[in-house]
């Protein structure tokens, strides 16, 4: 396996930003490192256009990524969607994320649903050259996942859901000259989520207030290089709330907030140890070995208390999204939002905007990202989502 090429692939996936870090801050720069970072990319245009949020927004077909327990409250009996995102367009033109998602309400009481999604993240074509600059081989490294979920109402206002996921990551090269045939890495994970919604009366208006949580990608490590380089999955805790109130007849406005924290321990930093002494070097090596050998489940609990800077650095690991959605008659939508990540943890900071148009059968959503961090490769990212409502199709063909 060509390790250099593999690392370049991993960096390309994880190139979420190119932060400008001052010299005095370099020792504090310590983003959380995981494998299969593409699992954290928002797949759909609706959530992305509000700053990457969706823990407590109204249910839609792409709730599998944000909070699958919302499917139990879905208005339609079934739906399917296809999303496409050209990725890192400012750097290359052949990296993309494609996502297929769907759900189906089951039972006669409209209180449970099954769901599934398939993600495919392509890193485009990468060529391996020999020492003379000639091309040896080329391939298309990729990552993919398939999951299936179940959600159920536990009361008129509360539901929970679970998801089981298979993950496959193929980033390496096969070095036929050295007889080293690289293989992809597999992993398994699960999500658990909850959703609560109520309808308070404010003045003379009936509003909607919802809360949601989702703990995603709880599972095994992904082991690259035949198990020699295990990496944590991007286990994530998402908390969110949404408040919707009517502006006038057929006009609604929803204000949404999401908080995220990766449940992955931070990699030890050399700057936190006295590397100039043998004792400091030994302490750093021990800490690094413990981090590499730590199980993913231990890492979840360790992630709340591992920051060298204490509580202040733990707060830096919390990302937040604030967004709004205006809808007219549930047919026309305008959205905007903002996403923030601390500069010492990755520096993803961007505005987002988008729009959507829905008919009885088809809904089309689009979003656009405008990064505020300098030289961010995420700037000007576009997403498109096409949704088909099965109830609408049934009514359409029924009328014929």
Image (cartoon, rainbow, N blue to C red):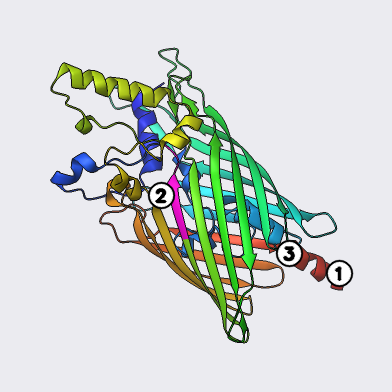
Residue 93 is tagged as: 2
Q: Which residue is mark 1?
A: 398
Pick the front one: 189 or 169: 189
Helix, strand or loop at mark 3: loop
Q: CA distance from mark 3 to mark 2?
A: 37 Å
Q: CA distance from mark 1 to mark 3?
A: 16 Å
Image height of 110 relative to 278, above or below: below
Residue 76 is tagged as: 3
Instruction: Find residue 250 and report its horizontal and vertical position in percent.
Output: 63, 83
Crowd rating for badge 2 (residues with CA inside 10 Å; few <14, some 14–19, many 20+):
few
Q: Which residues are magenta?
A: 258-264
Residue 34 is tagged as: none
Instruction: Choose mark 3 or mark 2, whichever is in front.
Output: 3
Q: Are marks 2 and 1 in contact (CB under 8 Å)?
A: no
Kindly tell me whether residue 255 is visible in this rendering.
yes
In primary-sequence order, the first of circles 1 and 3 is 3
Task: State yes or no: residue 261 in magenta.
Answer: yes
Kindly tell me whether residue 124 is visible in this rendering.
no
Helix, strand or loop at mark 2: loop
Pick the front one: 14 or 86: 14
Q: Residue at x 37, y 54 (%)?
A: 378
């Amino acid at each position: 396996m060509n390790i250099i090429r593999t690392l370049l692939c991993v960096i390309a996936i994880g190139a979420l930003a190119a932060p400008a870090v001052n010299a005095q801050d370099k020792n504090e720069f310590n983003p959380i490192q995981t494998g299969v970072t593409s699992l954290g990319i928002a797949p759909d245009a609706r959530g992305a256009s509000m700053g990457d949020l969706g823990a407590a927004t109204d249910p839609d077909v792409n709730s599998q990524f944000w909070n699958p327990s919302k499917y139990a409250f879905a208005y339609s009996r079934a739906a399917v969607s296809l999303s496409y995102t050209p990725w890192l367009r400012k750097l290359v033109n052949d990296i993309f994320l494609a996502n297929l998602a769907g759900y189906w309400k089951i039972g006669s009481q409209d209180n449970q649903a099954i769901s599934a999604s398939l993600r495919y993240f392509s890193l485009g074509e990468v060529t391996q050259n020999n020492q003379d600059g000639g091309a040896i081989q080329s391939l298309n490294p990729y990552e993919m996942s398939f999951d299936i979920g179940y959600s159920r109402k536990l009361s008129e206002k509360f539901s929970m859901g679970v998801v089981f996921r298979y993950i496959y990551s193929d980033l390496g090269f096969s070095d036929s000259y050295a007889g080293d045939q690289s293989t992809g890495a597999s992993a398994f994970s699960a999500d658990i989520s909850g959703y609560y919604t109520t309808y308070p009366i404010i003045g003379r208006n009936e509003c909607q207030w919802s809360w949601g949580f989702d703990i995603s990608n709880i599972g095994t490590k992904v082991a690259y290089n035949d198990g020699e380089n295990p990496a944590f999955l991007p286990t994530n805790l998402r908390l969110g709330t949404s408040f919707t109130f009517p502006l006038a007849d057929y006009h609604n406005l929803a204000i949404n907030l999401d908080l995220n924290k990766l449940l992955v321990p931070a990699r030890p930093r050399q700057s936190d140890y006295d590397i100039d002494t043998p004792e400091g070097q030994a302490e750093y090596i021990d800490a690094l070995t413990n981090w590499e050998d730590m199980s993913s489940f231990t890492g979840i609990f360790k992630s709340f208390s591992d920051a060298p800077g204490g509580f202040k650095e733990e707060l830096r690991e919390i990302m937040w999204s604030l967004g709004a959605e205006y809808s007219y008659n549930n047919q026309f939508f305008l959205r905007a939002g903002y996403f923030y990540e601390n500069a010492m943890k990755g520096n993803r900071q961007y505005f987002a905007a988008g729009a959507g148009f829905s008919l009885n059968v088809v809904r089309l959503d689009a979003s656009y990202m405008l990064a505020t961090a300098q030289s961010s490769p995420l700037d000007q990212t576009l997403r498109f989502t096409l949704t088909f409502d099965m109830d609408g199709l049934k009514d359409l063909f029924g009328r014929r």
